[in-house]
Amino acid sequence: MDKKELEKVSDFSLGEENTAYAQYFIGKSYLSTLNKEEAFIANVTFEPGCRNNWHIHHVGGQILICVGGHGWYQEFGKEAQFLKSGDVVYIAPEIKHWHGAVADEAFAHLALSVPVEGASNEWCEPVTDEEYNKLK
């Protein structure tokens, strides 16, 4: 997808291609750090079909604030949730999950986390095409 088109997905800065975490994504994403004081806030933009691997936030959770396009959020063992601008998802610590764009549209969310001593992310297996393609 053209970068100019991705910049229109939300009012927040698109940032740079998310190469540091590319190994944990299927497809291309972009990351823009918005705040590092007290709470970390980043705008994450996913190209159509892009999603991150299953992962777990240990000790500290995460909040997603959807700001553009449409996407998916799924906790392991549960049905996927369709996401649209204005939706807010709280992800408790130790919950295995993934999130990303729908197949035919870009998606952006703010990812918010509060630094907690001992917090870490555990990246797990990719969301397979078979799992992803079942979502409608």
Image (cartoon, rainbow, N blue to C red):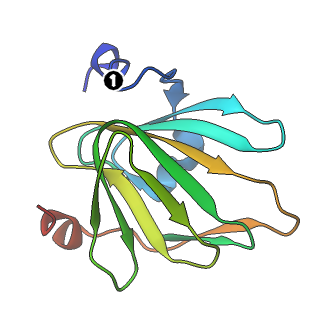
Above or below, 124 relative to 49: below
Q: Farthest bottom residue?
A: 77
**Total label count?**
1
Residue 104 sits in quarter: top left
Residue 78 sits in quarter: bottom left
Q: Nearer the viewer, residue 43 or 123?
A: 43
Q: Is 61 displayed left or right of 4 in the figure?
A: right
In percent of the image, x 33 and y 46: which residue is there? Answer: 27
Above or below, 61 relative to 58: above
Position of the C terminus, as image quadrant, is bottom left
Mark 1 residue element:
helix
Residue marked by disc 1: 6
Q: Is 26 displayed left or right of 132 in the figure?
A: right
Above or below, 13 relative to 50: above
Position of the N terminus, as image quadrant, is top left
Above or below, 127 relative to 84: below
Q: What amino acid type is highlighted by mark number 1?
A: Leu
Q: Residue 100: x, y in percent?
A: 35, 52
Q: Nearer the viewer, residue 56 or 110?
A: 110
Q: Farthest top residue?
A: 4
From this viewpoint, is residue 45 visible? Answer: yes
From this viewpoint, is residue 52 visible? Answer: no
In percent of the image, x 28 and y 18: which residue is there? Answer: 5
Q: Residue 97: x, y in percent?
A: 45, 71
Question: Dot 1, crowdedness within 10 Å: few (<14), some or many (≥20)?
Answer: many
Q: Nearer the viewer, residue 79 or 52?
A: 79
In percent of the image, x 36 and y 69: which residue is there? Answer: 74
Q: Residue 45: x, y in percent?
A: 42, 36
In percent of the image, x 81 and y 55: which residue is there? Answer: 115
